[in-house]
Image (cartoon, rainbow, N blue to C red):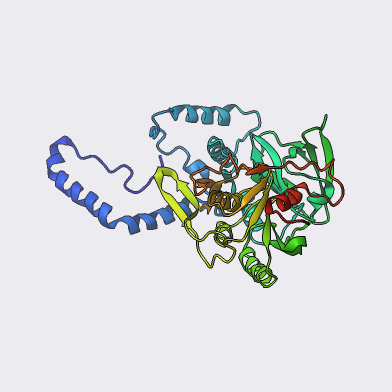
Amino acid sequence: MANFPFANPPSPTKQRAHRYVSTYLAVILFILTFGSGIFIGRAMILKKQLSSSDSRVAVSDVINIDRGVNHSKDVDFVQFWTVWDKVREKYVKQPVKDSELFYGALQGLVYGLGDPYSVFFPPAPAAEFTKSLAGEFGGIGAEIGNKNNQLMVIAPLPDTPAERAGLRPADRILAIDRKSTLGMDVSTAVEHIRGSTTTTVVLTIMRAGWDKPRDLTIHRATINVPSVLFSMRPGGVAYLRIMQFNDQTTPNLSRYIGMLKDRKAAAIILDLRNNPGGYLDAAVAMASEWITDGVIVSEKFSGGRENVHETEGLHRLAGLKTVVLVNGGSASASEIVAGALQDQKAATVVGEKTFGKGSVQEFENLPDGSALKITVAEWYTPNGNNINEKGITPDTVVKEDFDQEQVGQDVMIDKAYEILGIKK
């Protein structure tokens, strides 16, 4: 057993117990009251003692601590240690690395939640994931998700390699560079798809209506997509297409609202199709432009805790007739906007049922370089509907058929004009 401070204080003999009881109680009370700083200091020293030169915890020095402790009423951890020992003893390729078993066990622990958005990253993948969050990257320009334990395309972003190669929402990804995606989590899939901008990646795709899978070779590129597109359409209709919700979405939207106001727009088409989402605050700010009072979205955490986001800002689009376009590629923040405008009767939602990605993840770096991304809350619309997995059902269902539509035709925009009562 490792020599932790205060782990096993020597027990006084029965003959001397009465002489030491009050002393031990005083010492324990002192530790509980004032010892947190000392404990943290000792813990830091301990971490240094148990860490290797590359700052990773030397698992073999700590893994056998207190095997008898069992913190669950449902399972017996003795079985875990039994399997651990048998693997280390019997596996054909020796020696078995404790660190690989340790990180593999943690990955399996989080996988056991059955949540595709909760992932444990060992140190190397954690570093890559953190790096990808910091700036531009080489990729194909598609949001990848997991539905019913199947990796699929949520949305190819406009004018990206993914769109040009023919990827569509709901395409199932069976393999990446001939490697099966069976059991692969979203973060691992993204890691395989990203790469140098001078290279290609082969996705094996299965689509509804196909009799067999097809390979799509996609050239990676630096992905940099504008967050908002704006144009004035026939009949004085302002067309706003939101590509993603990032730190540029709110200022861009604000600028375009000023422009459509100057041009006295008669109505708005808000296009959220194939929008994979993004920042919560950008979604709240956008929906607030239409909603003058009440809730935009609620976050519900474990233990019953709730965080309610109410409308904010100037509400510059309140009362302006609006149609929101959605499809199966509309996810996350775009579902928040569509759900809020629908529930608050600020717009008519048209299109196909949205993806159903209504959960909040926290990303935490751990001391040894590994990291945990875990779902901590779910989003609910103003009427209390859970977005996660259920999605937003449109007020008017319109299905797109790319194989049947003529060049330049958009059946959803046609339906939007019909609902607005404006001729194109």
**Quadrant holding the C terminus:** bottom right
**Residue in the picture at 71% in, 36% down:** 181
Foreground: 49 or 321?
A: 321
Foreground: 332 or 271?
A: 271
Residue 13 in the figure: left or right of residue 51? left
**Residue in the picture at 64% in, 56% down:** 322
Q: Compared with residue 330, is residue 266 higher up or lower down, i.e. above or below?
A: below
Q: Compared with residue 316, is residue 12 higher up or lower down, i.e. above or below?
A: above
**Residue in the picture at 75% in, 39% down:** 171
Q: Residue furthest bottom?
A: 262
Residue 304 on image: x %, y %: 40, 44
**Residue 170 in view here:** yes
Residue 416 on image: x %, y %: 71, 51
**Quadrant holding the N terminus:** top left
Q: Quadrant of residue 19?
A: top left
Q: Residue furthest right?
A: 407
Residue 407 in the figure: left or right of residue 6? right
Foreground: 80 or 180?
A: 180
Foreground: 319 or 401?
A: 319
Residue 30 on image: x %, y %: 23, 54
Q: Compared with residue 123, is residue 210 higher up or lower down, i.e. above or below?
A: above
**Residue 219 in view here:** no
Query: For the image shown, how many numbered marks are present on the structure?
Result: 0
**Residue in the picture at 38% in, 29% down:** 73
